[in-house]
Amino acid sequence: MSSARYAPTLESIRSHPIPTWFDDAKFGIFIHWGLFSVPGFAAPTSHISDAFSGNHDNAMVMTPYTEWYWNALRVPGSPTAEFHATHYGDRPYTNFRDDFNAGLRQWDPDEWARLFQRAGARYVVLVSKHHDGYCLWPSQVANPHQENWCSERDIVGELGQAVRAVGLRFGVYYSGGIDWSWNTRPARTFAEFVGSVPKGGYAAYAEAQVRELIERYSPDVLWNDITWPTDLESMVALMADYYDAVPDGVINDRWMHQNFALRLLSRRPVQRVVDALIDRSNRRAYAKGEGQKGIVPPRPAHFDFRTPEYTRFDEITPYKWEATKGMSASFGYNRNHADADYEPAEELITGFIDAVSKNGNLLLNVGPRGEDAAIPPQQVERLEAMGGWLDANGEAIYGTRPWERADAETSDGFPVRFTRREDRVYAIVLGVPATDDIVIQGDPMLAAMSNARVRRLSDDATIETTTVDAGLCLRDAVPEQARSGSGVALAFEFSPGS
């Protein structure tokens, strides 16, 4: 008799609950690191959405993502091709493997793990294979198109061991839909990109590699990207086997299996029609100032959580989600990004708080350098700032759930976000008011909030409350040391039965 808990059916895998650890964790680290981290270059585009605005014919070449280097390099005259010719001549992309492996000799996974722990992260997701097909573990599944297309060190295994040793969960990203070592034709447009899933034996290859990752590393997060190359039946069987192997694992939402529509999209005439429709829609939206910022992937047949990219959901959602983004416009390391190109720590923190208030996590990316395996100092500084804020205010974040409403505003215009746990509600002011008092506007909340004991998390001070015409006034709620910080977190504690 089989001991499997999950049958290879949608009904069975949809019974898989979101594990408490993932809902409680709130903050994870994403790592994009590979051969593309050696040149560290992309077109000077300020946001992924800008690549589609008025530039649809070359959107996938003009992306700000340095991890797309090999695709852009294949397009003559592209900024990447010109950069490569200037700095590397006719050297093939595959030769960056030597530089990357040399840099690995300086890599200390334990140092990374300690940094992520100080940052307040509760889980880490490593890109095990990006679109260039290069594997960061010694895969026994041979790539038929590129010999020894994997790193010398077992990066996946070493990092997984290091982060788990400091109490963090560990997951893996895998580019299931795209592999440029199999498909050598460059993708210029969105339809060309989505329709470029390799054919032949690629579906079996990708499934075998993911099964290998599951067997070797038991990843707590299984994070696929773009699409999935098998049919629905094979994909569901893989997911069922993963849940049986890792019962408290989670699967993201980028598993669009190969169906009739995706197979049709692999045809060039269909791609041209789809691209024309997308381009027309984008131009109209941007002309009205309504262009979408970021990427929200379509819903697949099954997922545990959603993954908006470089954007967030505006409302509390009934399902779990995870905002995924880099600290600058790229996930992979960009050598041209100075401190001003990175999002300020205060904005990263307030965006994180906003996501948590609406049932989201934050998966914040680091992009280490390829030549020396070092995380750039601008990224380290922001991780340390995240950790500092969470050290003082993490009670309002970890283990919380959305309240009946996500937001409010102070009388002087600062946004407020709410979270909750059993006997308390947390109000977090996004920013620091100029006065010592905070007045939270909104009559509906006053009945629930005015009879609570209020405590400031940063120093455990009790805050006096009074009801005023504008709302609920919190007396002397802003300490002097918060003036240079990212906001004030307050706990409203209720007595039983109140």
Image: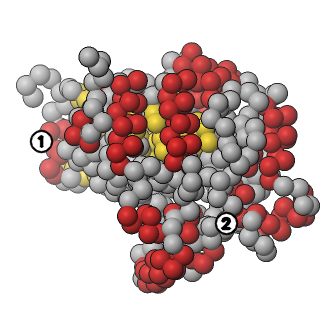
Q: Quadrant of residue 55?
A: bottom right
**Quarter occupied by the C terminus:** top left
Return the residue at label 1: 447
In this picture, residue 114 sits left or right of residue 491: right
**One can see residue 352 in this view:** no
Query: Which residue appears farthest toward the left when viewing the image?
Result: 497
| Residue 91 rendering spot, x and y as whole percentages | 88, 56
Image disc number at residue 305: none
Return the residue at label 2: 186
How many discs appear?
Answer: 2
Color scheme of the displayed model: secondary structure
| Residue 454 rendering spot, x and y as whole percentages | 27, 30
Work out whether residue 497 or residue 114 is closer to the camera in this orientation and state it: 114
| Residue 186 rendering spot, x and y as whole percentages | 67, 66
Please tell me how crowded label 2 is: few (under 14), some (14-19), or many (20+) other residues with Cα within 10 Å. some
Pair 1/2: label in front: 2
Q: Quadrant of residue 277?
A: bottom left
- Give amino acid for label 2: Pro
- Give amino acid for label 1: Ala
**Quarter occupied by the N terminus:** top left
Q: At 76% across and 41% down in the image, what residue appears?
A: 147
Assign a secondary structure to mark 2: loop
In this picture, residue 448 sits left or right of residue 158: left
Work out whether residue 270 or residue 227 is closer to the camera in this orientation and state it: 270
- The Cα atoms of the two marked residues, 1 and 2, are separated by 60 Å
In this picture, residue 207 sits left or right of residue 44: left
In this picture, residue 16 sits left or right of residue 308: left
Disc 1 and disc 2 in contact, CB within 8 angstroms: no
